[in-house]
Amino acid sequence: NAGVTQTPKFRVLKTGQSMTLLCAQDMNHEYMYWYRQDPGMGLRLIHYSVGEGTTAKGEVPDGYNVSRLKKQNFLLGLESAAPSQTSVYFCASTQGQMNTEAFFGQGTRLTVV
Amino acid sequence: AQSVTQLDSQVPVFEEAPVELRCNYSSSVSVYLFWYVQYPNQGLQLLLKYLSGSTLVKGINGFEAEFNKSQTSFHLRKPSVHISDTAEYFCAVSPPGSNYKLTFGKGTLLTVNP
């Protein structure tokens, strides 16, 4: 059972570079989310999607873009990385309706130098 | 808007001792309540949740939590902890109809010492 898979697991970027984080889930979930985790801050929602072809902003969307072209994939893009985007990024998915449990990936540790 | 306050950033305890991790929330609407656990270098895993009904909720690994509406609290408890319970614990809320978005507290690091 793969669940939620994030690629890559680690990455170091230089300021100004771009990259895309991939999240894939094999549970046929409708809802997908990108969170960032910073020390002492808990997790904060960046963007989310309620279904294929839809995306919406979360609490901290600036500097990020997302796309959900296929139901199973949710991509997070950084167009021009900044040191403030150094963080651990988690993808999550939820079936929705009365099944409210969120399933999380293992995380992507991103360092911007 | 909702907010979650976890009152202790770190809780050290000895093995086999009881533990309580405290969580208070603020919301103008009713919310679903969750506790997630994060083991080192891993993602988050659901421990337990309160949606409605009985205010005492039992979860995995012997944990339980009690929803107190008047005090807007959802404290997590375990009567006897093990070394393997060492992890970070996050309390989270989600209002019904919010597309299941979670608002997290800042986390409590539980360290169980031998």
Image (tube, helix red, strand yellow):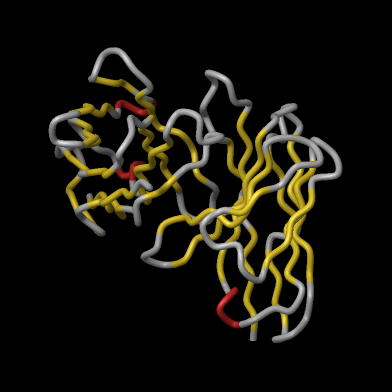
Residue A1 or B65: which is nearer the viewer?
Answer: B65
The relative height of residue B43 versus residue B41 in the rendered view (above or below) is above
Locate residue B34: give its quadrant.
Answer: top left
- Residue A56 % position (x, y): 66, 49
Furthest residue in direction top, as rendered: B53
Q: Quadrant of residue A22?
A: bottom right
- Does B72 sit above or below residue B43? above
- Residue A12 location (% of width, % of height): 70, 77
- Left or right: A55 in relation to B83: right
Relative to A45, residue A52 above or below = above
| Point 19% across, 29% down: residue | B69
Quadrant location, the C terminus of chain A:
bottom right
Q: Nearer the viewer, residue B58 or A76?
A: A76
Q: Is residue B108 above or below residue B60?
A: below
Displayed quadrant of residue A60: bottom right
Where residue A41 sits in the image (x, y, percent)?
39, 63
Residue at 34%, 42% in the rendered image:
B85
- Residue drawn at x 74%, y 37% is A25
Q: Quadrant of the N terminus of chain A?
A: top right
Residue A85 place in picture, x, y as percent? 59, 74
Residue at 45% of width from left, 28% of height from top?
A: B96
Q: Nearer the viewer, residue B41 or A17?
A: A17
Q: How many marks?
A: 0
In this image, B9 relative to A98: left or right?
A: left
Kindly give the residue lying farthest to the right in the view shown: A69
Image side of residue A15 versus residue A42, left or right: right
Work out which residue is located at the far front of the displayed protein and give it.
B28
